[in-house]
Image: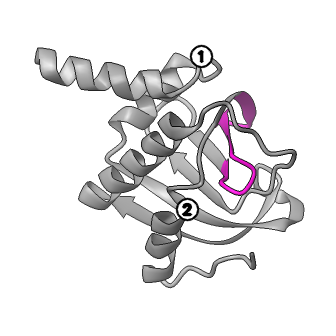
Amino acid sequence: MSRVMAGLLGIIIAAFTADIPKEAQEAFAKATEFDLYSLDPSKETKSGFHGWAILGKTSVKGELAKKVREAIEQGISENRDTKGGCFLPRHGIRINGGKKPIDLVISFQCLYIYVFEGEKQTGWTLTSSSPDNLINQVLTDAKVPLPEK
């Protein structure tokens, strides 16, 4: 790995707080393909995505996956310890390929991202709401329904 690439990977990983396991950080930083979910924050369910009803999902690959990943990394780096007093996730990401899937359950409204490895929550971080529009556009372009705001 070149020094430039190693430096960029370090910046990406540093964007996550220390509350994210290293394996999850690396899996997200390297992801070239993942599933993007639209979640209904008003409907909790045991059969959904970590307790939230799934409205639909799409597979995101290549340049689009890179664009979404970079937007989320930017959102994480933009947060200056601002927190919401809620957790209303409207988005989820599942990264497959490791021993267990790595899942991000995202509430841009409340500024939290919860991280799961398999079914176990292993960490969390804060984000800004800046990635929300891009992610909604990706879902809309794939004809995946969005929850009501």
- Residue 95 located left or right of residue 5: right
Q: Element type at marker 1? A: loop
Q: Answer whether residue 1 is visible to the viewer in this image.
A: no
Q: Position of residue 95 (x, y in %)?
A: 49, 44
Q: Quadrant of residue 114?
A: top right
In the image, the segment drawn in magenta is: 106-122
Kind of residue at badge 1: Ala
Position of residue 31 relative to residue 11, above or below, is below
Q: Is residue 117 magenta?
A: yes
Position of residue 105 relative to residue 125, above or below, is below
The residue under the point 43% across, 64% down is 59
Mark 1 residue crowding within 10 angstroms, few (<14) / some (14–19) / many (20+): few
Position of residue 76 relative to residue 91, above or below, is above
Which numbered disc covers residue 18? 1
Q: Give the alpha-carbon distance from disc 2 to disc 1, as whole Å.
A: 23 Å
Q: Position of residue 139 (x, y in %)?
A: 50, 73
Kind of residue at badge 2: Asp
The residue under the point 59% across, 16% down is 18
Q: Is residue 21 magenta?
A: no
Q: Position of residue 30 (x, y in %)?
A: 34, 35
The residue under the point 51% across, 39% down is 78
- Residue 103 located left or right of residue 41: left
Q: Answer whether residue 121 is visible to the viewer in this image.
A: yes
Which numbered disc covers residue 132? 2
Q: Position of residue 65 (x, y in %)?
A: 35, 55
Q: Element type at marker 2? A: helix
